[in-house]
Amino acid sequence: MRQAMAAAAVGDDVWGDDPTVAQLEAMAAAMIGKQAALFVPSGTQSNLCALLTHCQRGDEYLIGKDAHAYKYEGGGAAALGGIAVQPLPVEPDGTIALDGIDKAVRPDDFHFARTRLLCLENTFYGRVVPLAWQRDAVAVARRHSLATHLDGARLFNAAVKLGVTPATVAEGFDSVSICLSKGLGAPVGSLLCGTHDFIKAARRWRKLLGGGMRQSGILAAAGIYALQHNVARLAEDHANAALLASALHEVAQVHVDAAMVQTNMVFMTPRAGTATALAQALGTQGILVDPGTTIRMVTHLDVSRDDVLAVADAIRRFYQ
Ligand SMILES: *Cc1c(COP(=O)(O)O)cnc(C)c1O
C-alpha cells in the first residue's frame, strides 16, 4: 500500500484533474452500484455531505438512535445545516420497527419540520442488518417520498459475511457512504456514492466543509489498493472475532454474547468493578483497553489469530 501511494500519478483534485482520485471514485461507484462517487477525508464528512445534500434547513431526517451518523458525529447536521433529527428506537440487530418509521414521517403542515430522509447503517455494531428488512424500510421511505442514505462505513464486512456483492447491500439507496480506513486498512478516506447529480451537489458541500484536497491521489492510491486487496480477507477478521468470542466464553468473569458476533466486533462485559484493573493489567502487556461497562474489541488486518489468542489468554490469567 505504501508503495502504491509513493508511485501514484497525481493532479489537483480541487480542479478535478487528479487521475488516481478519479480512478478510485469510478472504482467505488462501480463496486457499490451507483453512477458516481466522491472521495472525502472521513466517514463523518461523507455522512455530513450526504445529509446536507439531501436536506435543506428546517428539514429533518429519521435515523436509529444509536446510529453513528446521529450519535457520534458531533451533531454536524444541526450545527452546520440547520437540519433536525428524529432519532428512532433501534433493535440490537440494527432494525427499526417499520410502522415506527411510517408513523415518524410528519404530515405536510407548517407546524412540523419536513421529513426528508431515512438514514440506515450496515453493519450496525458489527451486526449484519438483514437485507430483507432493509428493502422493506427503503420501501416505507419511498412511499413517503423520502430519500434514503446508507452509512456503509463497514458495508464490506456485511457483504463478505453474507457472500453477496457490495452493490447488493447498497441496493435501493439514493446514497451510500463507505470507509476505506476501517477494516480495509487505508490510512485515510471515505467515499460517498450516488447519482451524477447527487454527487455534483455533494462536491459543493465537500468544498464548503474543507474537504477539497489537492494531490490527494497519494491517499486515493491507498484506497484503490485496499479495495483490490483487503476486501475478501475481511473473512479472516470475522473468523478471528469468532475465535476471540469463543475463547472468552470460557472465562466465567466476563460476559460475551457469542451469538451477537457476526463480523469483526466482540463486545465483552467484565464482572462489575473489575474493568479498570483489567485494563491496567492488560496495559502492562501492551494490550490497550478503553475500560467501560462494555469493552468493544475489533479485529482487523493488523490483528492475527495468535494476537487474538494472546488477548484471550491474558484476560483469562487476570481472573485466575
Ligand atoms: C467510523 C464510522 C463512521 C465515521 O468515520 P470517520 O472516518 O471516523 O469519520 C461512520 N459510520 C460508522 C458506522 C463508522 O463505523
Image (cartoon, rainbow, N blue to C red):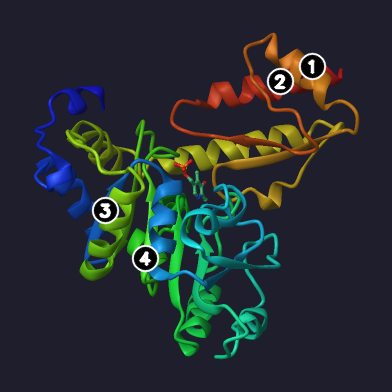
Disc 1 residue type (three-letter)? Arg
Could you tell which of marks 3 and 1 lies nearer the N-terminus? 3
- Tell me how far mark 2 sits from mark 4, CA to CA: 48 Å
Could you tell which of marks 3 and 4 lies nearer the N-terminus? 3
Disc 4 residue type (three-letter)? Thr
Which of the 4 image quarters holds residue 291? top right
* Picture mark count: 4
Q: Can you identify the residue that label 2 sits on?
A: 313
Residue 34 screen position, x and y as percent: 27, 66
Q: Can you identify the residue that label 3 sits on?
A: 38
Q: Which mark is residue 53?
A: 4
In the drawing, does residue 255 fall left or right of residue 98?
A: right
- Say whether marks 1 and 4 touch (CB < 8 Å): no
In this view, the residue in front, 194 or 228, is 194
Q: Can you identify the residue that label 1 sits on?
A: 317
Could you tell which of marks 3 and 2 lies nearer the N-terminus? 3
* Residue found at the very far front of the displayed protein: 110
Badge 2 density bin: few <14, some 14–19, many ≥20, Cα 10 Å: some
- Say whether marks 2 and 1 touch (CB < 8 Å): yes
- Tell me how far mark 1 sits from mark 4, CA to CA: 52 Å
Disc 2 residue type (three-letter)? Asp
